Image (cartoon, rainbow, N blue to C red):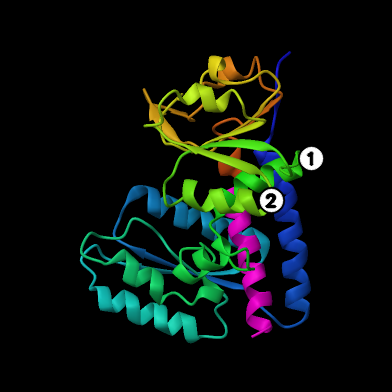
Amino acid sequence: MAATIIDGKSIAAVIRDEVRAEVKNLRERGIIPKLAVILAGDDPASVLYARSKERACKNSGIEFELHKYPENVEEQVILDKLAELSSDPACHGIMVELPLPRHINKERVMRAVDPDKDVDGISPINRGRMFTHKDGLFPVTPQSCIEILKRQGISLERKDVCLIGRGDTVGKPLIFLLLNENATVTVCHTRTADLASHTLKADIIVAAAGKARLVTKEMVRPGAVVVDAGINDLDGKTVGDVDFEGVYEVASAITPVPGGVGSLTTALIQKNLLKAIKIQESR
């Protein structure tokens, strides 16, 4: 029996509708949500992501500011701008596009963002809040993995989840978000011995290792749910960490790449921005 394909694009559309409704209510109260993005250098992917966020914000009624700097910008210039934005009550959310130029210390930049405006969830304080099951602003790709399951009506409560990936961006934060949903989590990675022995026990597999088509049909228990958070370029084609065609035949539900987890990220940044406004109002 073929799997249900979880349509991330349609789920993202619902979230965007929710965002627009909430933004409308805020504007009626005299609050104009604003997102500021720092972009240093000309990394093509970063420029593309920044522009896509700008379009999404415009469609949602959110003000957007792009602060663009050349590749050789001094670190202190970035830190000064972050201090300015962090203290500006009219700015509700701050994002720093990664990667930063090599001469800029990423850790110092992450610490310079006001945690209550940190819509990308990069601040060490927000990481600590996530690890201790406190409320905060958390990374959107791990959130997308959770949200896409919830919106599909798939519960994580008491489920055995095999998470493949331990990176700082997706894997490590996702461990704690899954635990916070009362899932039982097994963490694997590309150097795990006999990976299939772990995946075959799982009710839900989340692949976030950054290795194209790592998860094959033989590694999935019939009826399991498979979430693919990988993005890889293979022979000019964008593919995930899961061999979609094969796994589709045995899983009960599966997210595609593209069109799955990645479809939610921009909408969830906006959700984080709206959450940030509530946090700032309660300070």
Q: Is residue 155 above or below residue 35?
A: above
Q: Which residue is mark 2?
A: 181
Q: In the visual, does 3 lie left or right of 58?
A: right
In the image, what residue occupies the spot 70% across and 54% down? 16
Does residue 282 show up? yes
Q: In the visual, does 2 lie left or right of 266?
A: right
Q: Nearer the viewer, residue 110 or 262?
A: 110
- The spot of residue 98 in percent (x, y) is 37, 57
Secondary structure, magenta segment, majority class: helix
Splitting the image into 4 quarters, where does residue 191 fall? Answer: top left
Magenta segment includes 267: yes
Q: Secondary structure at mark 2?
A: loop
- The spot of residue 22 in percent (x, y) is 75, 67
Q: In the visual, does 96 lie left or right of 60?
A: left
Q: Is residue 8 above or below residue 253?
A: below
What's the magenta region? 264-283
Label 2: few (<14), some (14–19) or many (≥20) C-alpha neighbours in 10 Å: some
Which amino acid, mark 2? Glu
Which amino acid, mark 1? Gly
- The spot of residue 48 in percent (x, y) is 43, 50
Label 1: few (<14), some (14–19) or many (≥20) C-alpha neighbours in 10 Å: few
Magenta segment includes 218: no
- The spot of residue 126 in percent (x, y) is 52, 68
Q: Which residue is mark 1?
A: 153
Does residue 93 show up? no
Q: CA distance from mark 1 to mark 2?
A: 14 Å
